């Protein structure tokens, strides 16, 4: 049996005018700034006044990702649609896709099947220009730093200690390490430099964590761009760049309103990766949804060890949020991969492999329940070749933890395939006497203690080793008074450990921190572990090879 591609399904959909979607969302049409018929930005004035909804917050996260797929965004979209089908006022808040993986390994990131946000081609490509604005602001700061140095360097910035990199929204390994300023004094001061993908830029993190335009400007001003010859930190405000950067970002900061295939309002805004940043959509988009809806569905990046941990320890701390319920997405296929089965051998019932892989799911479940103190439901994104015996085995193992398993068939059925999940989410949100939200670490602990708490409590590592430059950087961060910040661990998404080859539930391992950097504007310390990079490369066969457009402008090949 053949299936339509995601883009074919999206292109066949009849979209509703964005004004109609805004009315569904409870917005005043005067707060809309239209980007064509089906997209709009929403003025921050819409957040003024008393909330108009119950504002139940639901976080969707997932098991450790595998090439077999989990369907976290698809489940998020389908859940929002399903809640509408059972009479609840729901809205969804998602991250914007980065063009790097769209043209690299993923081919698109707007949900899938009959649970998508649309117009999917726009969302996956240029959308409303937010990422371009973020990249421009990032590179404006880089240009002003180097210009300051060539024009006298009154701040005494040491070119060897500049930590600010340039950014581009594309996977391009060639730009990881570069030397610039060559060709004589007229072309600048020669120095080592590099690029990050735009979603890894601190400007992206600042953008997503800012609570207002003035907060955005203040955060940008606090960005540490490097150090003087005397070892003192230099900030963005020292080079007088924050005002111009804010001017570039002022329109981008307004959340983007689109719709699902079923017409559910959707805010798609901001897009950091959870393996190299904090992995959550913007606080402003989340607040917009909570302000008007009864249920706001949002997602965090990659597995719960990355996205959910950072959602709780960074975003919730910053914004004063607490999810009322958490959805943990899994697939039988992915669990069998965690149990040692190769991707090519996933078809056919294999209870032994499934049982070997289920501990990955149960460790995520226990983290949510025991560490974060949140009620959770497991959503099994069902595939046609999943057997009843396999599904029952997952149910049995989760029953031991007191957690319900629901089947999600939203890929093929849209909201109708998520009714069971929606009903369980409503039940969890209405539970009385919930515990206070649990954080992984206390803020008054040291940098080492915070990182160790995440490693031991979430990853179940034996401990943490600070290696190479991280030893000196740790001392430097403490000397400059940055030790009271939360931590954001950059780690492979494919394992609880920092080794992507260790699937399932690794044992007897330690986490190696090789670099530490302060993101003062974002308000956290970034710890780079293992071999994780802030500029990915393209795979052997990039998705870009399959993407095309005909003479009528119809795009094909996007997932």
Image (tube, rainbow, N blue to C red):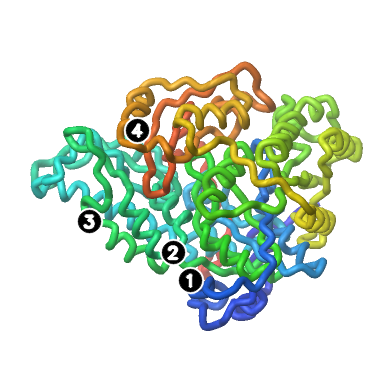
Mark with earlier residue (3, 1): 1
Let me know if residue 286 appears in the view. Answer: yes
Identified at 26% across, 53% down, the residue is 237
Which of the 4 quarters of the picture holds residue 333?
A: top right
Residue neighbourhood size for the residue with mark 3, other residues' Cα within 10 Å, grouped as few (<14), some (14–19), many (≥20): some
Q: Position of residue 62 (x, y in %)?
A: 68, 43
Residue where numbered disc 3 is placed: 240
Q: Are marks 4 and 1 in contact (CB under 8 Å)?
A: no
Give the Cα separation between the discs numbered 3 and 1.
26 Å
Q: Position of residue 300 (x, y in %)?
A: 60, 48
Give the Cα separation between the discs numbered 3 and 4.
23 Å
**Local secondary structure at mark 2:** loop
Q: Position of residue 384 (x, y in %)?
A: 83, 46
**Local secondary structure at mark 1:** helix
Look at discs 3 and 4 and give the one toward the viewer: 4
Residue where numbered disc 1 is placed: 44
Image position of 37 (left or right of 205) = right
Identified at 44% across, 57% down, the residue is 210
Identified at 37% across, 38% down, the residue is 482
Q: Are marks 1 and 2 in contact (CB under 8 Å)?
A: yes
Mark with earlier residue (4, 1): 1
Residue where numbered disc 2 is placed: 212
Mark with earlier residue (2, 3): 2
Let me know if residue 348 appears in the view. Answer: no
Numbered label attached to residue 477? 4
Image position of 447 (left or right of 310) = left
The one nearer the camera, 12 or 126, is: 126
Residue neighbourhood size for the residue with mark 2, other residues' Cα within 10 Å, grouped as few (<14), some (14–19), many (≥20): some
Identified at 50% across, 28% down, the residue is 449
């Amino acid at each position: 049996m053949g299936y339509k591609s995601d883009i074919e399904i999206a292109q066949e959909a009849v979209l509703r005018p964005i004004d109609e979607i805004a009315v569904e969302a409870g917005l005043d049409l005067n707060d809309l700034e239209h980007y064509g018929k089906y997209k709009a930005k929403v003025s921050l004035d819409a957040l003024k006044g008393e909330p108009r909804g119950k504002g139940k917050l639901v976080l969707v996260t997932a098991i450790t990702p595998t090439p077999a797929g989990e369907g976290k965004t698809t489940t998020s979209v389908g859940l929002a649609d399903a809640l509408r089908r059972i009479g609840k006022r729901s809205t969804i808040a998602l991250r914007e896709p980065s063009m790097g993986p769209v043209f690299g390994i993923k081919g698109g990131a707007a949900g899938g099947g009959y649970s998508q946000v649309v117009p999917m081609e726009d969302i996956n490509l240029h959308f409303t220009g937010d990422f371009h604005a973020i990249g421009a602001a990032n590179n404006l700061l880089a240009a002003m730093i180097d210009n300051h140095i060539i024009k006298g360097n009154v701040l005494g910035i040491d070119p060897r200690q500049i930590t600010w990199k340039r950014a581009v929204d594309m996977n391009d390994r060639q730009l990881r390490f570069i030397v610039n300023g060559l060709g004589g004094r007229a072309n600048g001061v020669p120095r080592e430099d590099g690029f990050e993908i735009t979603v890894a830029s601190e400007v992206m993190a600042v953008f997503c964590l800012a609570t207002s335009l003035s907060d955005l400007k203040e955060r940008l001003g606090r960005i540490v761009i490097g150090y003087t010859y005397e070892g003192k930190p230099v900030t963005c405000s020292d080079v007088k760049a924050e005002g111009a950067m804010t001017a570039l970002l002022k329109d981008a900061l307004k959340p983007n309103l689109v719709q699902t295939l079923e017409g559910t309002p959707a805010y798609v805004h901001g897009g950091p990766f959870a393996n190299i940043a904090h992995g959550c959509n913007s606080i402003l988009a989340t607040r917009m949804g909570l302000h008007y809806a009864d249920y706001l569905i949002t997602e965090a990046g990659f597995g719960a060890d990355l996205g959910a941990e950072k959602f709780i320890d960074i975003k919730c701390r910053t914004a004063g949020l607490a999810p009322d319920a958490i959805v943990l997405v899994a697939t039988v296929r992915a669990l069998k991969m965690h149990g040692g089965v190769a991707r090519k051998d996933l078809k056919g019932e294999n209870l032994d492999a499934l049982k070997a892989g289920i501990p990955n799911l149960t460790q995520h479940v226990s983290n949510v329940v025991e560490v974060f103190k949140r009620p959770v439901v497991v959503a099994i994104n069902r595939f046609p070749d999943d057997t009843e015996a396999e599904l029952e085995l997952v149910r049995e193992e989760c029953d031991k933890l007191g957690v319900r398993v629901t089947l999600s068939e939203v890929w093929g059925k849209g909201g109708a395939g998520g009714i069971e999940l929606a009903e369980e989410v409503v039940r969890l949100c209405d539970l009385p006497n919930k515990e206070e939200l649990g954080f992984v670490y206390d803020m008054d602990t040291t940098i080492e203690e915070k990182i160790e708490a995440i490693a031991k409590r979430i990853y179940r590592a034996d401990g943490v080793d600070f290696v190479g430059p991280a030893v000196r950087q740790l001392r430097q961060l403490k000397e400059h008074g940055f030790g009271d910040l939360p931590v954001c661990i950059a780690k492979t998404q494919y394992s609880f450990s920092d080794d992507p080859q260790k699937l399932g539930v690794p044992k007897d391992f330690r986490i190696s921190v090789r670099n530490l950097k302060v993101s003062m504007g974002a308000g956290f310390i970034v710890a780079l572990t293992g071999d994780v990079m802030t500029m990915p490369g393209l795979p052997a066969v990039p998705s870009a090879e399959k993407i095309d457009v005909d003479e009528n402008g119809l795009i094909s090949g996007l997932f």
